[in-house]
Image (tube, grey):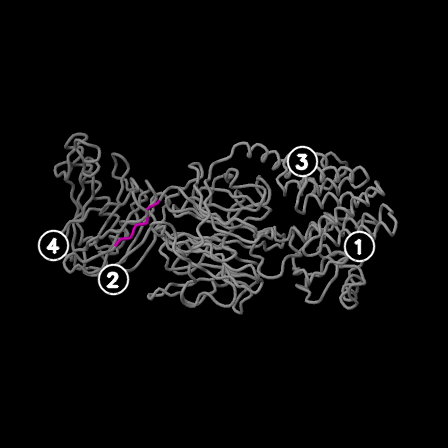
Amino acid sequence: MLAVEVGLFVVGLIRGKLVPANQTAFEKQVHGIVQRGPAHSVVLGLHARVERLDVEVPILGVDFAQNGIAFRSLALPSVDEVAGENVTYVVELCFRHRVVGPKGKGRFSPRTLQSMKRVILLVIGLCASSAVFGQSKSEVQRFQKAMELLRSSPPQVEKARAALHKLTASNPSYAAAWVGLGEAYSAFAPFDPIQAREAFVRGAAAGAERQAMFRWMHNAMDQGWYAHADSAASAYLALPKTPGAQRAEAEKIRASARFAQSAVLRPEDYAFRRLSDSVNRLDMNYFPSISGDNSTLYFTARQRSEQSDEVILASQRTATGWADALALPGSLNTRGNEGAVSIRGDQRVMAFAACERGDGYGSCDIYFSIRRADGTWSEAQNAGPVINTTQWESQPCLSADGRELFFVRESRQGQGNANIWRAVLREGRWVDVQPLPTTINTLGMESTPFLHADGRSLYFASDGHLGLGGTDLYLSRRVNDTTWSVPQHLAYPLNDHLDNFGLVVSPDGAEAFLARGGMFEGGDRVDLYQLSLPKAFRPTPILWWTVWVVDRATRKPVAQSEWSISDPERAATVAHRGPNYQVALPLGSPRGFQIQAPGYQILSERKVLGERSSDARTDTLWLEPIKSGQRTRLENVYFATDSDVLLPESRPELQSLAAWLNANPSVRVQIQGHTDNQGSAAYNLDLSRRRAEGVYRELILQGVDSNRLEFNGFGMSKPVESNETEQGRARNRRTEVLIL
């Protein structure tokens, strides 16, 4: 009997079906198998207390230790989900629920398991079927030898196919051999969809309907044979009494296959361009990250050799392309593995993933490194238990301003799915750590999140949404802090039947970067590519703006400057301290700046990027020492139309003004209101006075002594520009602070 654990229950395989078994007897059998070795049957799942077997556990000739397979202590499906099912489906669930998986980081796509998974499913399921359908001992031995050829390294595909052809010719009713032959043509190169379909159909006719159509629809979808996947899934769904979980899977494959058949008829031109050898220096180059000013490309690289470790490299953009990629200087790269890098827009902070470190909380954790003043990178700092857990955390994405962290966490419930999570940096601590809503996260696998510098456009990979097979790339746009738009599938051929992931988009939104190659298919190389992004999938372009605050008299930066940067569209405010600030300015999206320093007049600025002529710009803002008669325009105070009601987006400006007044208790000011020339002089004079009074009252509520405040309205009597244009009238509608 073949024993399989399902949650806290144990079932056994008897004539190809699963029946309940005794827990104690099962545990004894586990220990017996481990001690006695390969002459005995195989255990697929282990008790939840056991995380990994370091001894060899053979599975009908498949050596878990030799093939780098480790058991995981995660929950399997419920006993109701699999009782009475063929063992092939249970093994399928084991992989889908990640009870078994690759030893090591698990940082890559599920496609790393495909080859081994297919062999284990095939050998277990088909050997079980052999017992049911009663083939001769000689035929079973011939079948097992053919399977051994498929799972040899490298697979001896042609010999296996020849053996299975002979076996099916001599016994056309041998269903397991037909299904094995279908697998040999659909899961191992060189592929042949015609031969595969014929073999699976013959296997179904010989009595293995469920197994044949289930494997055929999966393999056809994996290879991009969408019409075949559609027909196989439809055939499976037409079978009587198929289990609910398998039916749901078949329905999803059929829907995806039909979506894919339509999608491939509407390709986009991405103009893929492989980056030069100066970037693609090693065998495998992947997980790119681009700086906010579009000048530097960071990525993970390693040689294909198992002895090679992952390192983080960076390449500088030049007038003609990219300079030689170099390992980051400092203490970041070690003899271990550092990968899945994400750089903050200003290139001062980096997030990345590392696994099995002494200070880790789980198998893989997220770490940070800080760029020192000399340009070197600090030793890795674990992100801590708020971000990292006993689960698997990886693939971080720092927002351009460093205030948000998106990352991938494997399910707490152990259901084998991985979702995208988000955390917010507030007062130096990561808080509000939550998964993204189900608009984005599915019961499948989400991975490689990338938030563009516009703060709205989230690119990610998933196998849970309708797609073309494997993992596909999607775009969702932020509506507010808790709501995201329905993901938009990125068109073929950027997405195809293979796993596609790890897309990052440049600040201007016109180009993107990702890795392509044989990362999971045993190819020789994985290289970074640059591509043109169609307009429908582009984010809002941004300008990387660097601002210096300088004393107008001394021409020296003011190191004690305190900043308040507000985003009216998201009702968000960021605090900063220092002589300069770097920010992503999205095209057409306003940003408010309030800057103050001890002994200086408060400075108010409002920036709206109307056009974009370069990737980056540097500006200077001038601070003046406090003195009587100085006047400051409050650029970020807003009123409702023809009203003295302050709008909510005015709050950050008035809070900064109140803080400045409280920090300079000897200063007395007058709040002055001004209007344009639309309406009568009397109406505008009254409106300007009421608006000035509104600011006056708000400052008192903020704790400013009323004895230090005055207010007055001047209507349209003191224009600063012509009222003949809308732009001029907008400049004339203003609130000012005069130092008395």
Q: Which residue is mark 3?
A: 228
Q: Which residue is mark 1?
A: 12
The mark nearer the N terminus, 2 or 4, is: 2
Write the start and end of the magenta stretch as one range. 542-547
Q: Secondary structure at mark 2?
A: loop
Looking at the picture, how far across and down is residue 503, in whole percent? Answer: 48, 47
Label for residue 559? 2
Q: Main secondary structure of the magenta part?
A: strand
Q: Quadrant of the N terminus?
A: bottom right
Q: Secondary structure at mark 4?
A: loop
Identified at 18% across, 32% down, the residue is 683
Q: Nearer the viewer, residue 107 or 660?
A: 107
Q: Nearer the viewer, residue 478 or 635?
A: 478
* Front: mark 3 or 2: 3
Looking at the picture, how far across and down is residue 666, in whole percent? Answer: 16, 59
Label for residue 113? none
Quadrant assignment, res 716: top left
